[in-house]
Image (cartoon, grey):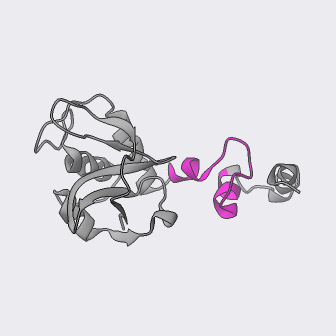
Amino acid sequence: MSAQKHVPFLMTRAGAVSALTLAAVGGSMLVPGASSEAYAATTHAGKALKVAASKKGAPYRYGAMGPSRFDCSGLTLYSYKKAGKKLPRTAQQQYNKTRHIRASSRQVGDLVFFHSGSSVYHVGIYAGSGKIWHSPKTGSWVKLEKIWTKSVWYGRVG
């Protein structure tokens, strides 16, 4: 029987338990419209993601940390600061400070670190579906974009 056929039963049995909680506990989409992405909106990571998304279109500027211009690590620092978490300044320092996780364990709001060899050169915030919010380079702006390489590591802010 599919998860969809279980929804009425789960909702009846759930009582006061919210649909978001059911979706998070089940680890899959038990309730239409509820997902782990929706659940993440209540976490520091989800709040940071929401802040980053709110900066869509803000121009890139090397060394900028907001509120109207950002470089890549400036966007992640600013977003997590607004969500109540402190990060160091550079992408490499942020990688060193996060709990490293496998790609299969990544969640919305985790940091995505782009690397060459052992050196991290770029960072963004995972938005789900293989996409990140980031501030990529001079002449660009904060945007949602598909992860374009397999040379990435993931980190979770504690």
Q: Is residue 39 left or right of residue 114?
A: right
Q: Residue at x 37, y 46 (%)?
A: 148
How many marks on residues?
0
Check residue 38 for magenta coloring. Answer: yes
Q: Position of residue 133 (x, y in %)?
A: 36, 42
Vertical relation: 8 (above or below) 94 = above
Vertical relation: 44 (above or below) 53 = below
Quadrant of the snapshot with the C terminus:
bottom left
Check residue 16 for magenta coloring. Answer: no
| Residue situated in front as seen by the camera: 81 or 155 | 155
Q: Residue at x 34, y 35 (%)?
A: 143
| Residue situated in front as seen by the camera: 150 or 86 | 150
Q: Residue at x 25, y 47 (%)?
A: 78
Vertical relation: 52 (above or below) 76 = above
Q: Position of residue 59 (x, y in %)?
A: 20, 30
Q: Position of residue 35 (x, y in %)?
A: 63, 49
Q: Position of residue 96 (x, y in %)?
A: 24, 70
Q: Is residue 93 left or right of residue 19?
A: left
Q: Determine the image quadrant of residue 89.
A: bottom left
Q: Which residues are magenta?
A: 20-41
Q: Determine the image quadrant of residue 51.
A: top left
Q: Is residue 14 left or right of residue 90?
A: right
Q: Is residue 120 left or right of residue 5?
A: left
Quadrant of the snapshot with the N terminus:
bottom right
Question: Of all residues shown, which one is farthest toward the left?
Answer: 63
Q: Residue at x 25, y 60 (%)?
A: 115
